[in-house]
Image (cartoon, rainbow, N blue to C red):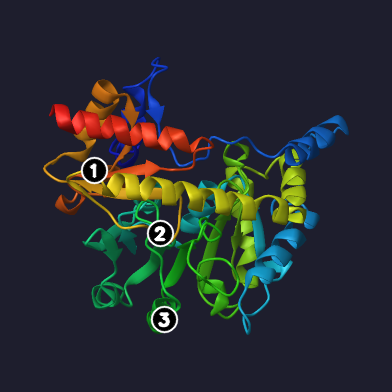
Amino acid sequence: MRQTVLNLQESMIRQVANAGLGRGDVLKFWFGESDEATPSFIREAAIASLQQGETFYAHNLGLAELREAIAAYCSNLRCEGAAPVGADRIAVTSGGVNALMLAVQAVVDAGDEVVAVTPVWPNLTAQPVIMGARVRCVSLQPVAGRWQLDMDELLAAVTTRTQLLIVNSPNNPTGWTLSRAEQQVLLAHCRKTGTWILADEVYERLYYESSPNGCAPSFLDIAAPDDRLMVAHSFSKSFLMTGWRLGWLVLPASATTHMGKLIEFNTSCAPVFIQRAGVVALQRTDEVTPQVVAHLKSCRDTLVPLLQAVPGVELSPAPGGMYVFFRLAGQGDAFETAKRLVIEAGLGLAPGDAFSVDRSPVMQGWLRWCFASQDRARLGEGVNRLRGWLARR
């Protein structure tokens, strides 16, 4: 076994969840998924495909129908003046995480330098490490509970030696979202340095601020089709399809065939019956995503004021994503705090340490709460448990 693999850290979120295994009384807000099942018409599309015997291999890059549907979906979301996305730029993947890993495999060699904006979902910094790259992190900074990017620091970190810049926006866990102006600055800078950008935009539709196209700013709104840009997407969040493991990459057309080769050596292809479900999800997106976004905004707007009323809690409403990232004053080790909350209060949250490569002191006391709950009363009960636990301490 490679030493790099042996050195990989076990997910702290999983470790916290393990502390609550077998307990039916734990309120679980630790994982990044809704507790609402996939809409029936999407499930029925997969069932129909299976009943028709579609149990064979597909094209490495995905079914032509799905690639065309994804291209149309992406193009329809673009702002005025943006280049349309062609199907020749789409690679269907077995989930968003597979899309991200494939992107890293495509451009990163052992010894390469990779820059990542953190805190961030740990897979994004682990993937280049698995490839043998050196990862340099540029951390967002909390200002009155709201996370902000020091653009000068990031630009200084991305040089001609930087092979890849990884940016997740809207961000997991903080909800921080790149502005259009910041994207333009980053794209122009990476063009000069020759750096690839991997933009994880899986939360693009889960955006609660006013925007012309109803979603967060995307690099696809401003990039040329041949820019060194790969954008990762997933059906998981905005289509309620986390367990289906279906995603896609948008990349330069010149790279698509090569990405197909990589897919062959990883998964061969996404299952046909799952791709059929993806086609129907995109065809009927207006019946799913707007309702998901409206409900998540309602959940966020329920949870935030309740948490803000708890003494010692510091937070600011996030503009995007499905999380509240908040700080508990006086609590140091967030990992230990999260485990104690499970054991002592029956409250399952993700520790902020999980989203920092080096368990930075900046993460001390920070916790992530996924608010994607069908029953908003559960959010209130969770806050009551947190308040009671703090009072007992």
Q: In which quadrant of the rendered view does residue 15 lie? A: top left
Q: Is residue 229 above or below residue 100?
A: below
Q: Which residue is mark 3?
A: 181
Q: Residue at x 63, y 38 (%)?
A: 244
Q: Residue at x 75, y 53 (%)?
A: 284
Image spot of residue 4 (x, y percent): 31, 42
Tag 3, which secondary structure?
A: helix
- The CA distance from mark 1 to mark 2 is 47 Å
Using the image as rendered, state which of residue 296 and residue 173 is in the foreground: 296
**Other residues around mark 1 within 10 Å, as few (<14) / some (14–19) / many (≥20):** some
Where the C terminus falls, by quadrant? top left
- The CA distance from mark 3 to mark 1 is 35 Å
Using the image as rendered, state which of residue 192 and residue 258 is in the foreground: 192
Image spot of residue 35 (x, y percent): 54, 35
Q: In which quadrant of the rendered view does residue 26 lie? A: top left
Does residue 17 appear in this view? yes
- The CA distance from mark 2 to mark 3 is 31 Å
Q: Which residue is mark 2?
A: 109
Where the N terminus falls, by quadrant? top left
Residue type marked 2? Asp
Using the image as rendered, state which of residue 31 and residue 122 is in the foreground: 31
Residue type marked 1? Val
Q: Residue at x 40, y 63 (%)?
A: 167
Tag 2, which secondary structure?
A: loop
Say the numbered circle drawn on residue 310. 1
